[in-house]
Image (spheres, helix red, strand yellow):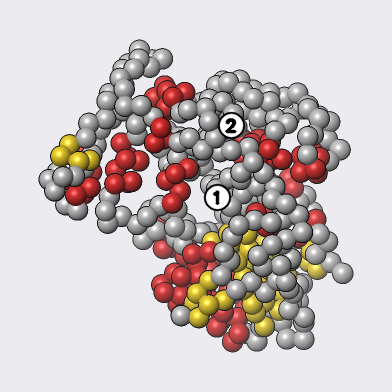
Amino acid sequence: MRIVSPFVFASSTGISCGLEAVGVSDTLWAIESLEVAARAFSLNFPKATVFVQDCNSFLKEVLEGQETNAKGQRFPKKGEVDFLCGGPPCQGYSLLNRHRGNWNSRLKNSLVSTLLSLCDYYRPRFFLMENVKSFISEEKGLVMQLTLQSLLRLGYQCCFGVLQAGSYGLPQDRKRLVILAAAPGELLPKFPEPKTSFPSNNFVTVKGKKFGPTTTWCTSAPLRTVTLRDAISDLASLEPSDSASSFSEPMSCYQRMLKGDSRGPIRDHVPKLLTPLVQARVDHIPKVPRANWRSLPNIKLLLRNGKYTRKLVYRSFGRGVSGVCPCAAGKACRREAMLQHRTLIPWRLVHRDERQNARPHADIEQAYSRPHWDDWKSTLVTVVSAEKVTVQASFTYSGYALVDARRNLSRRSE
C-alpha cells in the first residue's frame, strides 16, 4: 500500500525520491520557499502541487481556513495527508556552521515547531523528520526532548535513530538524525538494516542516557564499503576549464545502478574554475593519496595572473611559541591585524589549526586533500568553495589538479 504525503522544506527532492523508489509513498504536495528548488521539485514530481511559499505562511493560511493560496493552488485538507515528511534547515544545528548563533540561523531553528504544528493540524498516520546529528545535543538536549514530547502529547508513538549514509551504499561519511512517529493504531516503522560495512559510531547520549541503533546489524553489514573508485572511476579526468559529455561504460555495480538504461551524454561533468592562487595551491599538493594543505611549500612563486605569492611569516609570541597570531600562545586573537594575504600556505587554515582555545575541527585535514581511491568522502556540503578556503574544499584523485566536478559530487550523494 502506498500512502500520499506532502514534503515540507522540499528542496530538490532527496528524501521524496527515496520514499517513492521503495514504494512507500506518492508525493502529492510540497512546500518550498526557494523558487529554483521548487522548480526542480516540480520537474522530478510533475504530479505534485508545489507551494512556493514560506511554511509559516502556509500554516497561517490553513489555520485561517483558507482553501487555496494566492496562486489558486488548493491546500490539502485534513484526512488527505497520510504521511508528513520534512527536513527543517540544519544551519542552526550543524557544527559546520561557525555562525550558528546569528539571527538567521536561530530563525531557521524555529521551523522545527512549524513542522510539528503542521503535524498537529493534519494528524497524518505517519511522520518523519530528518536533521543533522548535532540536533540531538542542541541546548543540552532540550530541543530534542521537546520535539519528542510534542509528538507524544499529540498521541503519536515515536522513535529516533542516527543513520549513517555510508552504511546504506554511499561513499560518504554522513550521519543524520531521523525521527519516526506513527499515529495510534498504526505500526511504528523500523529503521532499515545497514547494507554496507562502514566504520561509524551511531550511539548518542541524551541527558546522560546512551542510545544505540535499533537495527540488527550494528557493527557490520553484509556488503563491503562503497568507495570513491566504485562511484566515479568511470568519469573522465579533466583539466581546469575542460568538460566531458561522452558516455563511458560503467566499471562497478554502483555506477551501473546510477546510470540505469541511460546512454546519453554525461551532464554537468565540469570542474570548478579556480582563482590563480587556489589553482597554484592545488598544483603544489603532492599527487599522492591523503596529501593535503599541510604539504604545501612555503615559497614565493609567480601566478598565472602575473602576481607573486608571498611567503607565510611566522612570528614569536613568547613562551617559545611561534605562529601566525598571538592566540597560538593563548593570548587575545588579533585575526584582522595579523591576516596575511596571497600566501601559498592558507593563513586561515594555519590560524584555525594553531588556536589553543578553538573548538577542534577534525575536518581541517580534508582541506585541499587528495582522497584515496579506496576511501570515501567526508560529509559533502551544498557549496564547495575553494576560494574561501573552507575545510570542505577537497580535491581529486590520482594526480588530477582540480576541484571536484559537479558530476563527481552528485555521484557520491545519489
Q: Residue at x 35, y 15 (%)?
A: 302
In this view, the mark in front (1 or 2): 2
**Relative to 318, is 342 above or below?**
above
18 or 283: which is nearer to us?
283
Query: Which residue occupies the extreme left position in the image?
Result: 318
- Please tell me the numbered disc located at residue 379: 1
Question: Amino acid type of disc 1?
Answer: Thr
Q: Estimate how packed mark 2 is, as few (under 14), some (14 to 19) or many (20 or more) residues with alpha carbons within 10 Å.
A: many
Residue 120 position by quadrant: bottom right
- Please tell me the numbered disc located at residue 397: 2
Q: Residue at x 74, y 66 (%)?
A: 192
Query: Which residue occupies the extreme front position in the image?
Result: 320
* Residue 250: % across, % down: 79, 34
Tell me if 326 is positioned left or right of 293 in this view. left
* Residue 386: % across, % down: 45, 34
Q: Residue at x 80, y 68 (%)?
A: 3
* Residue 257: % across, % down: 80, 44
Query: Which residue occupies the extreme top position in the image?
Result: 306
180 or 53: which is nearer to us?
180
217 or 394: which is nearer to us?
217
